[in-house]
Amino acid sequence: MNGGKRKWKALIVDDEELARKLLREMLSSHPEIEIVAECGNGMEAVKAAGEHKPDLLFLDVQMPKLTGFDVLELIDRAGLAIIFVTAFDQYAMKAFDVHAVDYLLKPFSRERFEAALERAKSQEGRKVVDAGELAAASRPVGQYAERIVVKDGTKVTLIAVNKLDYAEALDDYVSLVSEGKKHLKQQTISGLEMALDPVMFVRIHRSYIVNLERVARIEPYGKDSKVAILANGVKLPVSRAGYARLKTLLEDQD
Amino acid sequence: MSASAAVFSCRTAPLSRTPIWRILLIHVTAATVLTVFWVKVGSVVAHEMDALSGWKGTYKEYTQKTGLLYGAGEFYYLLSVAVQYALIAQKASQEAQERAVESSVRAREAELSALKAQINPHFLYNSLNSISALTSIDPARAREMCVSLADFLRLTLGMGEKAVIPLSEEVGLLEKYCAIEKVRFGERLKVNEEIQEEAKECLLPPLLLQPLFENAVVHGIAQMAEGGWIRLRATRNGERISLTVENSWDPEAGSSRKNGVGLKNVQRRLEARYGNDAQLQATAEDEVFRVNLSFPAETEKAT
């Protein structure tokens, strides 16, 4: 591809104004990069990413309401080069290293900035990193998601994991059922399973994860399959492997 | 034999926890019983010796000296008791000394780890990033920020050597801290102080309030897109001082203070200095997080 002629659309996301200004200044010597928007929080970032379809994203990690990881889960990442800009500790940075997304540690030098920019530009065509996997890798061992972010149209909803009844796999999506509502999210059910606390949630079937607290009883169904009946009457299929997992979990709790 | 009996009776009747009449009763009874027993044993032995040797003198001589034997028996027993009590007292004082050393070591450790925790590396990195941004946008402010940061570090490191500082000094440090964070957060951070005049000279362990402010920034202000406020109130009510740090926070932000390392540290430092005389209360309600500290008011002149 002809990198010299190509125009790049960049989005800057940081809750600190000075941090955004610094990036803008460093980008000013790159005429091939056009800053399409600056966002002060994750909600704005999700909206701006939908509107402008940027090629390059400068993303802070710790921000109010939605973190940088949350933003990644909610936007279309196809063809998007991501550079994290953060004062996060080295430990979390390992996650980025593993997943080969570049990052800038605050404060950073001009040279480091240029190197990250080059790397991001050459990322074209790279496979899309699963955002859920990235978030899971950045969490310390033994810590699980406390909430799940979903986007219904343009509206962003935060679901506390203890309010999640169950999740169902639907092709490339998962349907998350919470407080009587269904929310669709582009994520694999395995990715979701990794984010959830295995003491609270069980994969009872290839296509289902259930909140253990919601399960009222298990009943036989047909010859050798079973069905889980939730407190609100919803019935979910339980596979043989799922039943085994359920049993060990229930026995462990006794 | 008297001595080992004394060990037992002294352990069962420690001086400090037994009424005097009971101590006397126990030891006089023990002395009498033991002496009578030994004198009797002695007389039986003397009798047997006479029977074996055929000479009748031993028993006779023995019975003549029984009075003396009674006296000596009682005396040796009571002497053993006195020695035993002295040993117990010495051991107790040694243990008390060890405990005192241990608790002062623990207080010192709490102090050190509190100080180490004061300077949050993220605070430094973010501040340096702000300076980096300001160097080209607003060089004068960049210099100001460098000076604020240097002042803050100097104060923080200097305070670590003191056991206590006046509240006014701690407030000075908090103002520096907030000045730096205001450069980062701009309009998002609002700070309000209500400090009673009489409270200013009251003493407190250095950097006691700083971690509470840092918590307020990290868990409160930084989690709210529109920003929020921190308020410090200090009042002196005669013998006690009450310090309250409040901040606005978003209950839905998910950044709870589950592990609360900062709060625990403050609690430990209060305990190390004031023992049970200090209270720490943390409450979260109506989008306000509040920490109240209350401890004895001390001033430079009084101590």
Image (cartoon, coloured by chain):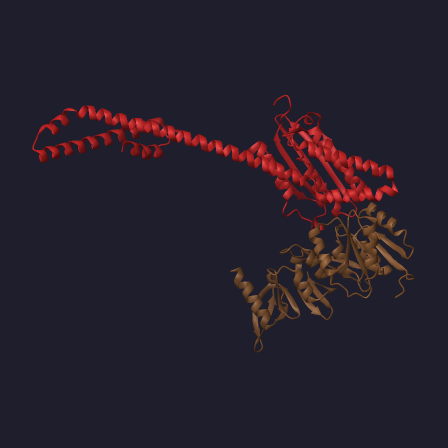
Chain colours: A brown, B red
- Residue B185 visible in the displayed image: no
Residue A42 locus on image (x, y percent)? 78, 54
Whether B10 is drawn above or below A128: the answer is above
Q: Nearer the viewer, residue B30 or A30?
A: A30
Q: Which quarter of the figure is the C terminus of chain B placed in?
A: top right
Q: In percent of the image, x 63 and y 65: which residue is there?
A: A210
- Report whether B143 appears left or right of B213: right
Q: In percent of the image, x 17 and y 26: which residue is there?
A: B66
Residue B229 locus on image (x, y percent)? 75, 40
Q: In percent of the image, x 53 and y 61: which residue is there?
A: A252
Residue A35 locus on image (x, y percent)? 88, 54
Residue B270 locus on image (x, y percent)? 60, 35
Q: Which quarter of the figure is the N terminus of chain B placed in?
A: top left
Snapshot quadrant of residue A97: bottom right
- Residue A18 visible in the displayed image: yes
Whether B280 is drawn above or below A143: the answer is above
Q: Nearer the viewer, residue B24 or A250?
A: B24
Q: Nearer the viewer, residue A98 or A203?
A: A98
Q: Which residue sits furthest top? A: B301
- Report whether A113 appears left or right of B302: right
Whether B52 is drawn above or below A109: the answer is above
Q: Nearer the viewer, residue B109 or B31?
A: B109
